[in-house]
Image: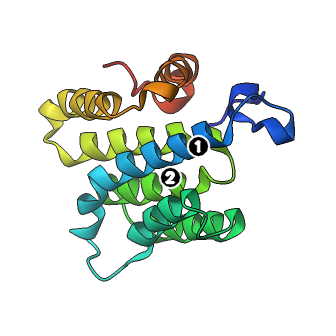
Amino acid sequence: MILPKVRDPRFITIRRGGTLTDDDHHLLALWAADCAEHVLPLFEAERPDDPRPREAIAYARAWVRGEFKMMETRAAGGHAMGAARDLKGAARNAAYAAGQAAVVAHVAAHELGAAAYAIKAARAAAPKDEADAAGRRECRWQRDRLPDPIRALVLDDQRLRNDICWSVFEC
């Protein structure tokens, strides 16, 4: 479980009683899509004929452009996570990252799920003695791509939820 027991109002949209603007929600979705796409080749190397994770990332970006409704995008995320079920290691985590990226449209706080699963995928793809370093590199890569308007929010979220996200944000 990567979501906190008590929802952070900073990740709830204003229209639902929180403080998150639509613009920042969109930035979170795009950043999550970038995180997932960065490790997507780890899934596609194992399942080149399964388009579900790539489609989920595309749905997330299309949702930001207003081309898909939240429910359609959330469904695409579920399909991507379904692609992970019988896999292990890097491929499984990469598919979960894609699924989490798509469901940001539904719950903005899934942004850390996409990032955390991407870091887990990078760790799993590396030789055992290099896994921690690979995870730190992936974490830094992600942080380098954080848009300024959401940077402080995401970094604080990583600090607050690091323990429930397998401590992957120690980079």
Determine the CA span between mark 2 and mark 1: 7 Å
Residue 47 in the image: x percent, y percent? 29, 75
Q: How many marks?
A: 2
Q: Which part of the image, by quadrant, shows the C terminus?
A: top left
**Where on the picture, by quarter, is residue 122?**
top left
The mark found on residue 26 in the picture is none
- Using the image as rendered, state which of residue 77 and residue 30 is in the foreground: 30
Element at label 1: helix
Whichever of callouts 2 and 1 sits on the residue coming sooner in the sequence is 2
Residue in the image at 38% along x and 77% along y:
51
50 up-or-down from 97: above or below:
below
Q: Amino acid at mark 1?
A: His
Q: Judge from the rendering whether residue 138 lies leftward or rightward of residue 8; answer left or right.
A: left
The residue wearing badge 2 is 101
Residue in the image at 14% along x and 32% along y:
130
Residue in the image at 41% along x and 32% along y:
147
Residue 1 visible in this rendered orientation of the protein: no
The mark found on residue 110 in the picture is 1
Q: Amino acid at mark 2?
A: Ala
Element at label 2: helix
Residue 53 visible in this rendered orientation of the protein: yes
